[in-house]
Amino acid sequence: MNIRIECYLAILKRYKEKYPDAHFEVVTRTAKSKLAPSKELLIHAKSIKMTFERYRILYLLEILDNIDALMRIEELREIAKEKIVFLICYEKNHSKCHRSILKDVIKNPKKYRNGIVFSCFKCQYKLEMDNDDYFCPSCKKLFCFNCIDEHGCNVEITPNKYIHQKWKVNQIK
C-alpha cells in the first residue's frame, strides 16, 4: 500500500507530470471532500493555536464518526493496493497536517476501526465522556475536553462500546 502526503496543491501539477498513473485525492473542503477537517475545527485550531495532538484527536473524532468518510477511506485503501495515492491539500508542511493523520488511518485500519478513548495519565484507567468533560473514577480527576492534552492525558485506541457507556472503566495493562 503506497500512500504519500508530501505533495500539496501549489505543486500538484509537477507531481501529476511525474506520476501520471497515480491517484491524487484532494482532501479539502473546497473540493467537497468527506476527509477534510470541518471549517469549525480549522477556525478553532487557528484561533487558539492548539497543539497538533489536540488537533489530531479532534480530527479523528470527526472522521471516525462519519460513515461517508469511513467509506472513502476504505475506497482509498483499495486504490492504494494498485497504485500510488497522493493525499493533497493546501498545507505545505505535511507533518502538521490532517494528511499525516489520514495516511495513518488508511494504512492502519485495525488501529482505528474501533474509535478513540482517552486514558488517565496517572493511573491508566480509561476515561469516559460526561457532557464536555472526562472523569477518571480511579484518581477522581476531571479533565476538560478542550484541554485534555494539556492535563497530561494520553490517547488510546479502544473499542467504540466504551465511548458511549457513561462511567465505564477498564484498566489498561
Image: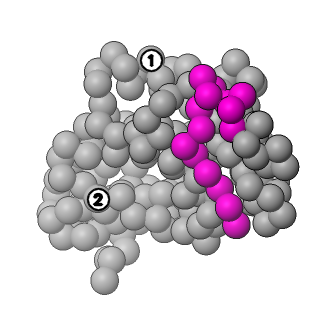
* Residue at image mark 2: 154
In the image, the segment drawn in magenta is 1-15
Where is residue 73 shown, x and y percent of the image? 72, 52
For the C terminus, which image quadrant?
bottom left
In percent of width and height, residue 80 lies at 76, 59
Please tell me in which quadrant of the rendered image residue 136 appears: bottom left
Which residue matches tag 1? Answer: 43
Q: Is residue 61 something that shows in the picture?
A: no
Residue 141 drawn at (x, y percent): 17, 53
Residue at image coords 34%, 45% = 53
Q: Residues within 10 Å of mark 2 (few under 14, many from 20)?
A: some
Residue 93 vs residue 119: left or right?
right
Q: Nearer the viewer, mark 1 or mark 2?
A: 1
Q: Position of residue 26 (x, y in %)?
A: 71, 33
Image height check: is 155 above or below 22?
below
Tell me if 101 is positioned left or right of 50 in this view: right
Does 9 appear in magenta? Answer: yes
Residue 4 lies within the magenta run: yes
Going by the numbered disc 2, the residue's amino acid type is Asn
Give the Cα distance between marks 1 and 2.
24 Å
